Amino acid sequence: MIHAFVDEHRQAFGVEPLCKVLQCAPSAYRRHAARLRDPSLRSERAKRDKRLAEQVSHLWRVNHSVYGADKVWQQMKRERIAVARCTVERLMQRLGIQGVRRGKTQRTARPDPKQPCPLDRVNRQFVAVRPNQLWVADFTYVSTWQGFVYVAFVIDVFARRIVGWRVSRSMQTDFVLDALEQALYARRPDPNALVHHSDRGSQYLSIRYSERLTEAGIESSVGSKGDSYDNALAETINGLYKAEVIHRRSSWKTIEAVEIATLEWVAWFNHQRILQPIGYIPPAEAEANYYLQLKSQTNEQLTPA
């Protein structure tokens, strides 16, 4: 900061008088000025910081500018860039960049106490040992110039992969059913091998939604308490979506704008975003690793001793 002040006022007051007032050695300032003119004179640490800062800035930008120091550091490790986490944090502070922060979530589902509910087969244990074992579903809202629009997600718990989603002006049953249909088409789960969990929202307890689950051979599960903790993983994905997409704009004009942004985010989330619960890798990679391991185990069993 002292050197920057001298740089700014040296023409008016001269270097030595400024250094005397600021208690800075003129020789130190001259070394600083020489390094500005010729970057090759900088220290090895300064040269390395410059290279790393460019890499940190690039990784932060290509990941939708949402990563904090921890995830930038993890991504750099994935790309074989040797750097300490504290260095990443220091450089991000110097660059004036940071990760997004999630705020409080709002409840959108409307429980209907008169509707019969399936059992809670999850009991807040959002764990799966394979893909298509447990899906969770929920939706959230977005305020636009045209009014509220609603965004539904279906998430495979094993790798936190978003397997179905839909944007709609209405939060009726058709809207969440469309997200489910997309998930069924994309995943084609085996009958009687999958549990679908949601909160007590009337959309998910509707007859048509329940019948579609039954038709697909999917066992239905509904949170027993009717609060966000009973569907915590889906609420977490909603929170990430709001923080990383919706809240980063001051306003949204149209449902089409929300839909395009959601499409881009889901593609990035599934294939590029690293997630701590699955080992700081993207969901698609976690699933690919599972199937590679399964194939390897099958080959070993088929190989004669």
Image (cartoon, rainbow, N blue to C red):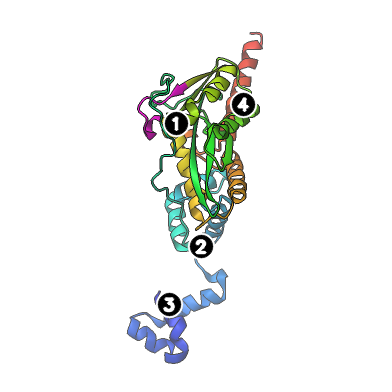
**Mark before the other along the chain sequence, 1 or 3:** 3
**Mark before the other along the chain sequence, 4 or 3:** 3
**Left or right, residue 264 beside residue 67:** right
Mark 4 is on which residue type? Leu
Q: Which residue is mark 4?
A: 184
Please tell me whether mark 4 or mark 3 is closer to you in this view: 4
Q: Which residue is mark 2?
A: 44
Q: Are marks 1 and 4 in contact (CB under 8 Å)?
A: no
Quarter of the figure with the N terminus = bottom left
Quarter of the figure with the C terminus = top right
State the extent of the magenta-drawn residues as a range.
Answer: 221-230
Give the distance between the C-alpha atoms of the residues marked 4 and 3, in whole angstroms.
62 Å
Q: Are marks 2 and 3 in contact (CB under 8 Å)?
A: no
Q: Is residue 269 above or below residue 181?
A: below
Furthest-top residue in view? 305
Please tell me whether mark 2 or mark 3 is closer to you in this view: 3
Q: Is residue 225 magenta?
A: yes
Q: What residue is drawn where x is 38% and y is 26%?
A: 113
Give the distance between the C-alpha atoms of the residues marked 1 and 3, in whole angstroms.
61 Å
Give the distance between the C-alpha atoms of the residues marked 2 and 3, in whole angstroms.
20 Å
**Left or right, residue 93 beside residue 152:** left
User: Residue 209 is drawn in which quadrant?
Assistant: top right
Residue 227 bears which disc, if any? none
Q: Which residue is mark 3?
A: 3
Mark 3 is on which residue type? His
Q: Which residue is mark 1?
A: 201
**Mark before the other along the chain sequence, 2 or 4:** 2
Q: Are marks 2 and 4 in contact (CB under 8 Å)?
A: no
Q: Is residue 25 magenta?
A: no
- Secondary element type, mark 3: helix
